[in-house]
């Protein structure tokens, strides 16, 4: 049980790296963000990080009956793909992020940074593991990392940017390897 909680927290931290990187950039580019706007970022990012694994899980339940015999391999491939994509994105050019607050933009950023969480939910379904507690942990961690990212962005600027995604990508790849090897 303790190992599952630790694994879930590591997954949550890895998934929160996208939200953290975007939040860091937002903190740097939107120096005049008000507390309620920071709360909206954190709430939206946390909510989508919470709901996407659940959506992925229920989509995965439908197909898991057909692929149960290769579940570990599929889980590894999904996490490897997500991790490599996060690393690839962090090494690419930074996106041009607007310097004004917009609910539409917050929503789009929240969805974009939580797509990886959908695939993680799919993996949980394939492995026939519980999803509610991991989703809550993932959402809370994303909420906290968003707030932290914005405040750090305001303090230190955009020096680190997407490099935090490399750390998140490596964690997902390592967890994928763990699943593949069966520990």
Image (cartoon, rainbow, N blue to C red):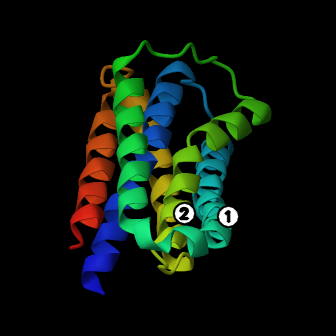
Q: Residue furthest bottom?
A: 1
Query: Taking 162 as reference, is 112 left or right?
Result: right
Of the pair 159 and 179, the residue shown nearer to us: 179
Query: Taking 87 as reference, is 133 left or right?
Result: right
Q: Quadrant of residue 88?
A: top left
Of the pair 27 and 119, the residue shown nearer to us: 119
Give the answer, above or below, for where 130 lies relative to 16. below
Give the answer, above or below, for where 66 lies relative to 117. below
Judged from the image, the secondary structure of the residue bearing numbered disc 2 is helix
Judged from the image, the secondary structure of the residue bearing numbered disc 1 is helix
Query: Taking 55 as reference, is 175 left or right?
Result: left
Query: Taking 85 as reference, is 111 left or right?
Result: right
Reading the image, the residue beneath label 1 is: 59
Of the pair 69 and 56, the residue shown nearer to us: 69
Of the pair 178 and 150, the residue shown nearer to us: 178
Q: Is residue 114 visible?
A: no
How far apart are the two marked residues, 1 and 2, measured between alpha carbons? 9 Å
Residue 70: x and y, percent? 41, 66
Q: Earlier in the sequence, mark 1 or mark 2?
A: 1
Reading the image, the residue beneath label 2 is: 121
Pointers 1 and 2 in contact (C-beta within 8 Å): yes
């Amino acid at each position: 049980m303790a190992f599952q909680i630790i694994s879930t927290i590591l997954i949550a931290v890895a998934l929160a790296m996208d939200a953290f990187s975007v939040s860091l950039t937002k903190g740097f580019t939107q120096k005049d963000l008000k507390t309620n706007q920071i709360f909206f970022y954190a709430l939206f990012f946390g909510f989508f990080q919470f709901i996407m694994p659940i959506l992925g899980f229920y989509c995965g339940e439908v197909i898991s009956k057909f692929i149960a015999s290769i579940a570990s391999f599929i889980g590894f491939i999904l996490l490897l793909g997500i991790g490599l994509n996060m690393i690839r994105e962090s090494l690419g050019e930074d996106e041009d992020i607007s310097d004004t607050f917009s609910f539409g933009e917050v929503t789009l950023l929240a969805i974009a940074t939580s797509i990886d969480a959908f695939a993680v939910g799919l993996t949980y379904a394939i492995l026939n593991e519980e999803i509610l507690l991991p989703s809550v942990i993932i959402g809370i961690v994303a909420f906290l990392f968003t707030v932290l990212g914005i405040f750090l962005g305001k303090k230190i600027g955009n020096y680190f940017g997407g490099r935090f995604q490399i750390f998140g990508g490596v964690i997902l790849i390592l967890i994928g390897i763990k699943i593949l090897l069966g520990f």
